Image (cartoon, rainbow, N blue to C red):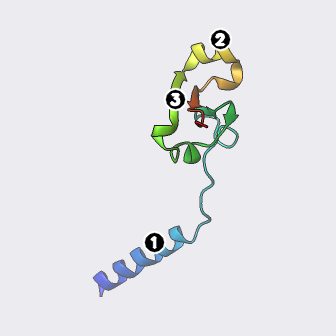
Amino acid sequence: MKKTFILAIGMMTILVLNAQEPQQAKTPKNDPSISTYLVDSVEMPYDQVIKINTNLIESMNVFKGPDAVAKFGIKYKNGLVLIKLKKAKK
């Protein structure tokens, strides 16, 4: 009886946790503790950045802490990742 009760409570907990709203992608606007990602000078959320084909990346520069603030301003105090994509060949 105890095992069945514990199993039922565990199953209900899982159902309740899974029923919550899906989490929004973290961006510097809704979570100021994460770095900002700029892809070809356009701000992009991390979940989209990780989908970029690495063969398309020409360069990537990471600026952290005081270095980021000194070069780009206080907005980037939690870091800045600059990603430059290769130009399409004609």
Amino acid type at image mark 2: Ala
- Specify the amino acid type for callout 3: Glu
Label 2 crowd bin: few (<14), some (14–19), many (20+), radius 10 Å: few
Q: Circle 1 sits on which residue?
A: 14
Badge 1 local density, few (<14 within 10 Å), some, or many (20+)?
A: few
- The answer to which of marks 3 and 1 sits earlier in the sequence is 1
89 and 17: which is toward the camera: 89
Labelled disc at residue 58:
3
Find residue 77 and report its image quarter: top right
Circle 3 packing at 10 Å, graded few (<14), some (14-19), many (20+), is few
Q: Does residue 7 lie above or below 57 as drawn?
A: below
C-alpha distance separating marks 3 and 1: 44 Å
* Distance in Å between CA atoms under marks 1 and 2: 46 Å
The residue pinned by badge 2 equals 70
Q: Position of residue 42 (x, y in %)?
A: 69, 35
Q: In the image, is residue 37 above or below residue 51?
A: above
Q: Residue furthest bottom?
A: 1
- Kindly report which numbered mark, 1 or 2, lies closer to the viewer in this rendering: 2
Q: Nearer the viewer, residue 36 or 33?
A: 36
> Is the residue under label 1 in contact with that under label 3 (CB below 8 Å)?
no
User: Residue visible at 65% across and 11% down?
Assistant: 70
Q: CA distance from mark 2 to mark 3?
A: 25 Å
Res 37 quadrant in image = top right
Note whether 4 is above or below 48 in the view shown: below
